[in-house]
Image: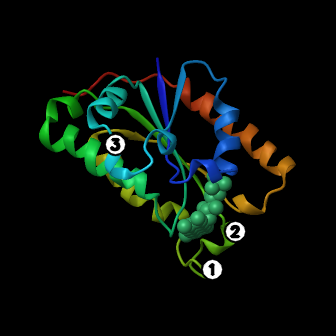
Amino acid sequence: MTTQLLMFHDRPERSRTNRVLLDAVGAIQDITITDMGALYKYPNEIDVDIESARLLSADRLFLQFPIHWYSTPVLLKAWQDQVLTRMYYIDTAQGEQLNNLPFMVCATAGNFESAYTADGTNGYPLEDLLRPLQATAHRCGWIWADPFLLYRSNKMDDAELGRAAEDYARRVAQWSSVERSAPVN
Ligand SMILES: Cc1cc2nc3c(=O)[nH]c(=O)nc-3n(C[C@H](O)[C@H](O)[C@H](O)COP(=O)(O)O)c2cc1C
């Protein structure tokens, strides 16, 4: 049972938070990590054949990324536009193979959780800003899990970030042990 964890960071060499989180889950059994930003410097370099095959090898899918401008990084949107369009609109037999795929997201945000409220400076909960991904999961027949959200990512010292990474590893390990149910025809 392979969990494919794809990390989308437009500048992975500048990442601190996502790098620490990624290091924390590296030792979990049956998890395969791909640093998409390191593989593809520019969104138009995404190799659709390779990425479709990677997705088809997944028993579970996990996407990890920083919030950029209340949304996902450019590279993740490009992956949706290129890989998912191929698998769900062109060669739809590929997408059908991923029916009932357990799917989870980890998003890191620089701002406080209190900013992500109706009265806060960002006006909306982070969960609401992730609805396009939830809708994508719904369209693709994937099983959405509650996301792992990390706030104040830039304001954490090493010790606090280390504790957050331990929480993250526990959550990913727990979720990874959930059985994938049989495809619905
Ligand atoms: C271009 C850009 C846009 C950002 N936009 C947001 C934002 O809309 N909301 C927020 O909470 N943090 C925002 N941030 C902060 C990032 O989410 C934060 O730097 C990231 O989670 C830290 O992870 P990293 O060390 O792996 O980059 C932004 C950062 C950058 C570089």
Residue at image position (28%, 37%) is: 48
Q: Which residue is mark 1?
A: 120
Name the one closer to the observer, 69 or 93: 69
Q: Amino acid at mark 3?
A: Ile
Tell me, for residue 129, which label it has, or none. none
Sequence-wise, which precedes: disc 2 or disc 1?
Answer: 2
Q: Callout 1: 10 Å neighbours few (<14), some, many (20+)?
A: few
Sequence-wise, which precedes: disc 3 or disc 2?
Answer: 3
Q: Position of residue 74 (x, y in %)?
A: 42, 58
Q: Position of residue 160 (x, y in %)?
A: 83, 50
User: Which label lies toward us, 1 or 3?
Assistant: 3
Do we see residue 19 in this rendering? yes
Tell me, for residue 46, which label it has, or none. 3
Name the one closer to the observer, 84 or 135: 84
Q: Position of residue 152 (x, y in %)?
A: 71, 63
Do we see residue 150 in this rendering? no
The quarter of the image holding the C terminus is top left
Secondary element under disc 2, as helix, strand or loop, is loop
Q: Position of residue 147 (x, y in %)?
A: 54, 48
User: Which label lies toward us, 3 or 2?
Assistant: 3
Alpha carbon separation for disc pair 2 and 1: 9 Å
Q: Which residue is mark 2?
A: 112
Secondary element under disc 1, as helix, strand or loop, is loop
Residue 17 located left or right of residue 129: right
Q: Amino acid at mark 2?
A: Phe
Alpha carbon separation for disc pair 1 and 3: 37 Å
Residue 182, picture quadrant: top left
